[in-house]
Amino acid sequence: MPRFRLLLLALFGLALVLAQEVYRPEVELVRKDKKVVAWVSGEEGSLFYADYGDLYVGELRGLEEDRVAVGEKTFFRDGGSALEEGLSPGDRVEAAYNKDLLRDGLPYLMRLRRAGEEEAKTYLRLVLYDPKGVEVRLGEGVEAKGPLGVVERGGEEALFLSGGEARFVEEEGRLDLRPGPGEVVVAQGAVRVRGSRLRYLNDTGEAFLEGPLQVERQGERPLSGKAGSLRYLLDEDALWLLGGVEFAQGGRTTRAERALLKEKEGYAYLFGGVESRDEKGFVRGERVRYALKTGEVVVLGRVLGEFRE
């Protein structure tokens, strides 16, 4: 199978300049009439790397820290090998591997996941690394940023954004990929949500940011808060905060099970056991409209309150 490798390493002075502007390589995933686009700055230290892998489907026979056995093949793995969670021996899996990168005679495992009904023809992995942050645009109104991005094509299309780093080992002709803990920021307008890792699946159009999350919004009355996780639905342009949502703003603290952010409208809609308290009392409801600029709340369903003069 023909192999293609594309490498942009500003570290080695390969940044391209067009009309006095730094060339910024990008990759996009298209879903219906919407796009998810990821790019690096193209400046010093940034990296854009892509290569194909071969695919092999079989029964998972062994899963060790440094190697994986599938059917009649065995692969070596490292920290850059992506494994779907919850795999166990006996599962029917699809292994994407680089047959040209060998260790102890074993080819390198790039990705391991449960096999779908239709077998893919090829696998393409694109790695984006930028000390200033890989930037991602989800549709029109949501952005994300983190140090390391990986885009996968083959069987399914996915994007992962996390901490960690990547570098090209020139003397060995290979990519050293090291995902790790870090900070990933998702933004909608003036709202910033900080988590640890973003996973977007193009088949479903869903993005998931792992928590615990920190929420903030700057302004005359700054908002700070927290949540368990974030879920963004590309088709609906809907950004949800889920699990233990809490907003603190101007002496008022508001808690809910989940919140739908509508930053363009200036509101968040809170659902599930909502309670909002300040020094004058509290108000409760099952559905509440929250003004992001001021922290004011309007109960839209099942109101209960107590206030002091």
Image (cartoon, rainbow, N blue to C red):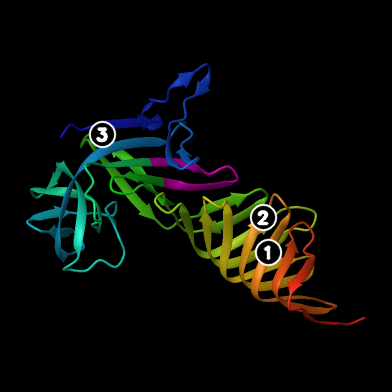
Q: SS at mark 1?
A: strand
Viewport quadrant of the C terminus? bottom right
Q: Secondary structure at mark 2?
A: strand
Work out whether 41 lies above or below 95. Answer: above
Residue 49: name its quadrant. Answer: top left
Q: Earlier in the sequence, mark 1 or mark 2?
A: 2
Disc 2 residue type (three-letter): Lys
* Residue where numbered disc 1 is placed: 269
Magenta residues, dominant SS class:
strand
Does the segment drawn in magenta span residue 294? no
Give the label, 2 or 3, closer to the camera.
2
Q: Residue furthest top?
A: 19
Q: Is residue 238 left or right of residue 284?
A: left
As rendered, which of 209 and 265 lies closer to the eye? 265
Mark before the other along the chain sequence, 2 or 3:
3
Q: Which residues are magenta?
A: 128-148
249 relative to 301, above or below: above
**Residues under labels 3 and 1: Cα distance?**
51 Å
As measured in the structure, the alpha-carbon distance from the residue carrying label 2 to the one carrying label 3 is: 47 Å
Q: Position of residue 27 (x, y in %)?
A: 41, 36
User: Residue drawn 49% across and 59% down?
Assistant: 209
Residue drawn at x 69%, y 71% as measured from the top left:
287
Q: Which residue is mark 3?
A: 170
Residue 65 is situated, as x and y percent measured from the top left of the image, at: 21, 63
Q: For label 3, count other residues whose C-alpha is less than 10 Å away and answer few (under 14), some (14-19) or many (20+).
A: few
